[in-house]
Image: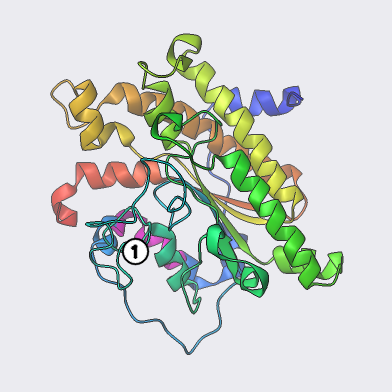
Amino acid sequence: SGLPSAILNIITDSSDLDVANPTSFMNDIGVVMGKFLLMLAFLSFFLLTTTKAWSQQQEPQVPCLFIFGDSLVDNGNNNGILTLARANYMPYGLDFPQGATGRFTNGRTFVDILAQLLGFPNYIPPYARVRGRALLRGANYASGAAGIRDETGNNLGDHMPMNQQVGNFGRSVEELRRLFRGDNSTLNAYLSKCILYSGLGSNDYLNNYFMTDYYSTHSQYTPQEYASALLQDYCQQLSELYKLGGRKVIVTAIGQIGCIPYQLARYDGNGSRCNEEINDAIQLFNSGLKRLVIHFNKVLPGAKFVFLDSFESSKDLVLNAKTYGM
């Protein structure tokens, strides 16, 4: 079940293209999303603050939020499975009112903040704990150690890769269909107003391609070939989300994981603050993902995909660390 050659050309083309203009998407969900985009560069600061009180005076900007990803946005789906990728113990949750819930942070996650900015009355719950009418507000399918490829993260134990997350979303859509009494037209109209957030790929490099003692992908693929293989899989997964009813989709780039302390200690940054071998490989994926988002907006009726360049945002944090109190 290979992809059409036109899609392959898009995700492997090395030409430099601009990001699709997200203006119409931003208008649909209000000014609050603009605040979300602006806060990307300041995310590290926000994650160090304690949770603020919810505003009970407004309706959410969108009816529901569905989240796909890894440990950056997992909020408890890994708690009940056999894995080293769990965060339901201290010091995780140190600054979170409910304590260690399975979030891989001391406080709120990226999507917790997004849910607040969008005006939801509560954080979006993990798929492991949400059923029935609660699905009308959305669900978080993210899983620590998850990747685009199924084998990614196996070195850490059980997890839910993107293919499984997409499958869980399909089961949620079927449950919503029952709530809508089989009225597909109304259900599709409802889902078309929701936001889907997808942020994956980091583990496909951290816990796959650059973990050569456990995985063989580094010897099987050049960096460009691996990026293309990832993008082929991701294209199919995002396309399936569209088929299931998703129309407004936020897709994030991989951040500068060559700059995280673990990678610097393991691979040596050659005197710099970052390991550019890793970052260069990631940028091959990011460039292809940007082009894929543009393509989706051109060919998928009603699609409003937005590409968030978290690589450049995290680069700004690294280059201007003192400005952000780091």
> Residue 252 appears at what percent x and percent y?
48, 46
**Rendered residue at 34%/56% (across/down):** 88
Query: In this rendering, would 292 be left or right of 286?
Result: right
Q: Residue furthest bottom?
A: 57
**Rendered residue at 68%/36% (across/down):** 236
Residue 102 found in image quarter: bottom left
Q: Which of 37 and 206 is in front in this view?
A: 206
**Rendered residue at 46%/52% (across/down):** 80
Q: Nearer the viewer, residue 305 or 184?
A: 184
- Residue 260 on the magenta span: no
Q: Disc 1 designates what residue?
A: 108
Residue 296 found in image quarter: top right
Q: Residue furthest top?
A: 219
Is residue 14 shown to the viewer in this render? Answer: no
Give the dominant element type of the magenta stretch: helix, strand or loop. helix
Q: What element carries label 1?
A: loop
Task: Please provide the residue range marked out in magenta.
Answer: 34-43
Pointer 1 local density, CA inside 10 Å: few below 14, some 14–19, many at least 20: many
